[in-house]
Amino acid sequence: MDRTLIQEILEVVEQAAIASAHLTGLGKKDEADAAAVEAMRKRMGLIQMQGRIVIGEGERDEAPMLYIGEEVGTGSGPGVDFAVDPCEGTNLCANSQRGSMAVLAASDRGGLFNAPDFYMKKLAAPPAAKGKVDIRKSPTENIQILSDCLGIAISDLTLVVMDRARHKDLIAEIRSTGARVQPISDGDVQAAIACGFAGTGTHCLMGIGAAPEGVISAAAMRALGGHFQGQLVYDPAVAQTQEWADYTKEGNIARLNEMGITEVDKIYEANELASGENVVFAGSGITDGLLFDGVKFEADCTRTSSLVISTLDSSARFTNTIHIKDGAKSISLN
Ligand code: VTB
């Protein structure tokens, strides 16, 4: 991978965000996702690379585009692996709520963990707490460590947790320490990455979300120098999700084993989930969020706000782009 890829990847997420944004607030989450997928794939097709989807919309027989194993790009050039989530937070997008975005992570061939479509227990924290907090420790211990590392009183710490039945005890424990909980309905990728920057008001992400998106969060946090750990969740009693109503713990372990994951309780560090020599994260807002705004449609242009974090040049670029319409007459500065 080289630096020219940064600009290309930015355009990929911008195009996906614009496509989904046409459908925000219409209650059509599948359509919003499909539009983002199509736009992302189309723009990826123009990049001089031998691209490959390692995390995408699902297996080949269940997803027409951006399926796992799909080759993307022109077919010549560097080998690049992608983990994509063209519309992260589809419910947020469908309901025009804050925090949906088009995201992806890219790395050199073999540089992203091929996460199964399972759940993942996650811990994200700022760079100052990297390697100090630990997913093996209790939430109470980690909150004390966070407070010490950040120099912020426990009562001033805000921890983001997805608002799910499975987190009832976690939320109660966090509150018992005196720290604040910000429950979110969806979108733990944005919450994880927000921990990587000071001033976002988000100091930590704890709890269980989707595993594939954990790889995207890990790539961003590795490039930022923040803390991220993940551990696969295979017990339906822990995940407490309707989707696993007919699954058993033993069956899930067998599924993981079939995929080659035998150490099912392994704790993955950010640099194991995103292990390539270089990693790039890119996200573009569909709706407004913590890190950047969503797409704005105007008479003469469309505006996008995005973030690309890259180890290629150790940068985090916040970018506002004006996409000019044919015959535009007046484009305001902002
Ligand atoms: C979603 C989504 C998150 O995890 O909720 C999902 O909003 C899985 O959790 O951003 P549920 O099945 O309980 O909804 C994420 O996709 C990412 O980890």
Image: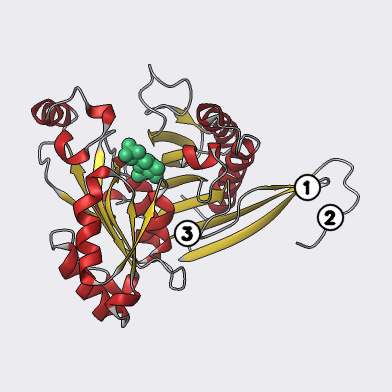
User: Residue pushed farthest top?
Assistant: 61
The residue pinned by badge 2 equals 331
Dot 3: element? strand
Disc 1 residue type (three-letter): Glu
**Which residue was labeled with disc 3?**
309
Image quarter where the C terminus lies is bottom right
Counting the numbered discs, the total is: 3
Report the side of 142 relative to 91 (left or right).
Answer: left
Across and down, in percent, residue 81 comes to 40, 40
Callout 3 touching callout 1 (CB < 8 Å): no
**Measuring 62% from the left and 59% from the top, which residue is drawn there?**
319
Q: Tell me the number on the disc at residue 127.
A: none
Of residues 232 and 278, the one drawn nearer to the viewer in this rendering: 232
Q: Is residue 86 visible?
A: no
Return the mark for residue 298. 1
Q: Disc 3 residue type?
A: Ile
Residue 118 visible (yes or no): yes
Q: Amino acid at mark 2?
A: Ile
Of mark 3 and mark 1, the one earlier in the sequence is 1
- Crowding at mark 1 (Cα within 10 Å: few <14, some 14-19, many 20+): few
Q: Secondary structure at mark 2?
A: loop
Picture coordinates of residue 78 (x, y %)? Answer: 46, 42
Q: Earlier in the sequence, mark 3 or mark 2?
A: 3
The scheme the figure's colours follow is secondary structure
- In this rendering, is residue 218 above or below 91? below
Pick whichever of labels 1 and 2 is earlier in the sequence: 1
**To which quarter of the image does residue 239 belong?**
top left
The Cα atoms of the two marked residues, 3 and 1, are separated by 28 Å
- Callout in the foreground (3, 1): 1
